[in-house]
Amino acid sequence: MITKAEIQLVRSLADKRNRDLEGLFVAEGEKLISEIRASHLRIRRIYASEGLFSGPEVTVATPKELERLTLLKTANNSVAVVEIPRHSLQIGDLKEQLTLALDEVQNPGNLGTIIRLADWFGIRNILCSPTSADCFNPKVVQATMGAILRVRVHYVDLPKTLSEARRAGIPVYGTFLEGENIYQAPLTPTGIILMGNEGRGVSPECSATVSHKLYIPPYPADKPSSESLNVAMATGIVCSEFRRGRNDPSDWGR
């Protein structure tokens, strides 16, 4: 039987302050929990329908109990309480890889999709401003479809970190209306891609650190179109361009 205290703990993890205090987050659903069990993350407790999982950390839960435990709109057949992983990051670690940086991306769905995109395109680190959505928000965790297990999200002083990266010789790319057409611009295989807030775009403080400004043009360019792209959609386009074979340095200028 699940105790009232257990339910209260799980429900409290909907709030970031409690996640930080307890060092725990919630994941839901058989597929995601199975992936977590096979990963490096440590599961504190699993509440699941009878016969779904086995092990000392598993507590059998009734449908009614799962409805009380869920942090989502619709209850799943299982809920796990997982320890939040702690990742360290050095600027030197970013020199030989492609990295995403998010400046106040505040919508949990957008952040979850971007983490999933990063996983798809082989990007292993995301730098986030402290005011970005929390990657262990239940909605973000579910939206990543397991990518949160493979992509490390770091919350940092973003302008300072980007400035340090520039001093270390790492190019910083960002999307701007006055930028160069991304389909024609030479793109390096490594560097940092900076994406901005859903409404305001990239902040002035982060803009000052950008070495290469890019623009995703509408098609056709001379006809009216939407004012802007959703930040997750734009991130997918930009990541795809960076991963294209044409970005081999030997092809630059062709």
Image: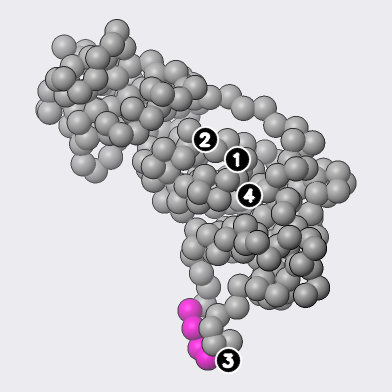
**Tag in front: 4 or 1:** 1
Instruction: Give the distance between the C-alpha atoms of the residues marked 4 and 2, in whole angstroms.
Output: 14 Å
Q: Residue 32: x and y, percent?
A: 34, 33
User: Which amino acid, by three-letter code, is at mark 4?
Assistant: Leu
Residue 111 image point, x, y percent: 49, 49
Please check the rendered image and state whether residue 225 is part of the magenta-colored stretch, yes or no: yes
Q: Is residue 99 shown above or below 254?
A: above
Q: Which residue is mark 4?
A: 100
Disc 1 residue type?
Arg
Residue at the spot x=33%, y=20% of the render?
9
Residue 10 point in image, percent of width and height: 32, 24
Q: Is residue 86 above or below residue 195?
A: above
Q: Using a 10 Å C-alpha cutoff, classify the residue at mark 3 as few (fewer than 14 neighbours), some (14 to 19) or many (20 or more).
A: few
Q: Evaluate whether residue 196 shows in this view.
A: no
- Which badge, 1 or 3, is on the more N-terminal residue? 1
Looking at the rendering, the stretch of residues picked out in magenta corresponds to 222-226
* Residue, disc 2: 150
Q: Residues within 10 Å of mark 4 (few under 14, many from 20)?
A: many
- In space, the residues marked 1 and 3 are separated at their CA atoms by 37 Å
- Which sits earlier in the primary sequence, circle 4 or circle 1? 4
Q: Is residue 176 magenta?
A: no
Badge 4 marks a residue whose secondary structure is: strand
Question: Disc 3 designates what residue?
Answer: 222
Q: Residues within 10 Å of mark 2 (few under 14, many from 20)?
A: some
Mark number, residue 124: 1
Q: How far is the residue under mark 2 from the one under mark 1?
A: 7 Å
Task: Tell me the CA gap for discs 2 and 3.
Answer: 41 Å
Q: Residue at x 19, y 28 (%)?
A: 66
